Amino acid sequence: MTRLGIDYGGTKTKLMLVSDEGEIARDTVSTGGLRALGESVGNFLERAGATPASFALTVAGTLDPATGVVGHSANLPWLNGTAPAEVLSSSLGVPGVAVQDGEAAALAEARFGAGRGGDDVFVIALGTGIAGAHVVGGRVRRGAHGAAGEIGHMRTTQSEVVCSCGQRGCLETAIGGSQLADRWRDHGGAAGTGASAQDVVAAARAGDGAAVAALDDAAQALARALLDVCALIDPGLVVIGGGVARSPEWTVQPAVAAAGAAATFHRLPPIELATLGVWAGARGAAEAAAGVPSAVSRG
Ligand SMILES: [Zn+2]
């Protein structure tokens, strides 16, 4: 059965067609409103010469999984209060669902990326925000209220830095992309406006002591989070991806070493780097499309 995954990003949208045998076609198009997206997807399907049985569309933001209505999307604000999969479904004539973007990427990494073959995988995305997802038997465990996996908002530092969630000392305040640059500045570093995690790593490589200190704090916070995840859910494998993990020797590797040194009763599983990169969301969406009923009443 052919399925379409749509990773609806802030500036670029990634499209991937898959069959039961694997990938058929992929393309990247500029992100526009839902009408433009419908046109881009229609053109893509025409070029690929395929009609999918179903699709799934990622949403960067909060999503009611029961209704498919977007609560709040910071990057695609025109989606707020709409059911984008329903709109796209009527323009394409193909049934579809919306899925949360982090959940789609985690699903793909767990099933086809670094977690391939694992049955119990915890996936961590270290980006501007920090996302976590526990994938068991190929399904993301969302929790009773759809609120599970918020590893970025576990208090893993002694710092009093206030997080976007209102708490203090969350993992995200230590290792979130832009936050890492703020911590570099807190240590006396010369972080310019808009400095990124990559800038902090570049400074550390050049011998900047403040950048090294900020990265060390970040690794310690991630180590604490890894130990707490192991204490709570004892996963069979942990997969770590995202922009901040792109320089693993400064982030993931020291965190894994610190977690190993601090572990007491914990059973630390293998900890692998994500392998699917920027296509994880589209691949995971194509997978989520498999769960869409092929005959949908369109009243
Ligand atoms: Zn927080």
Image (tube, rainbow, N blue to C red):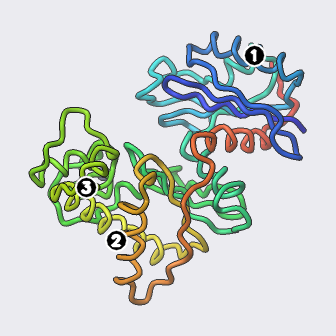
Label 3 CA crowd tier, 10 Å (few <14, some 14–19, many 20+) = some
Between the residue at mark 2 and the residue at mark 3, the CA separation in whole angstroms equals: 22 Å
Of pointers 2 and 3, the one earlier in the residue sequence: 3
Which residue in the protein does label 1 denote? Answer: 90
Quadrant in the picture for the N terminus: top right
Going 37% across and 69% down the picture, which residue do you hit?
255
Give the mark toward the camera: 3 or 1. Answer: 3
Which residue in the protein does label 3 denote? Answer: 204
Residue 192 at x, y = what percent?
A: 18, 36
Going 31% across and 51% down the picture, which residue do you hit?
201
Going 42% across and 70% down the picture, which residue do you hit?
226
The foreground one among 65 and 289 is 289
Q: Is residue 87 above or below residue 188?
A: above
Which residue in the protein does label 2 denote? Answer: 224
Going 38% across and 67% down the picture, which residue do you hit?
225
Between the residue at mark 1 and the residue at mark 2, the CA separation in whole angstroms equals: 47 Å
Residue 40 at x, y = what percent?
A: 69, 15
Q: Determine the secondary structure under disc 1.
A: helix
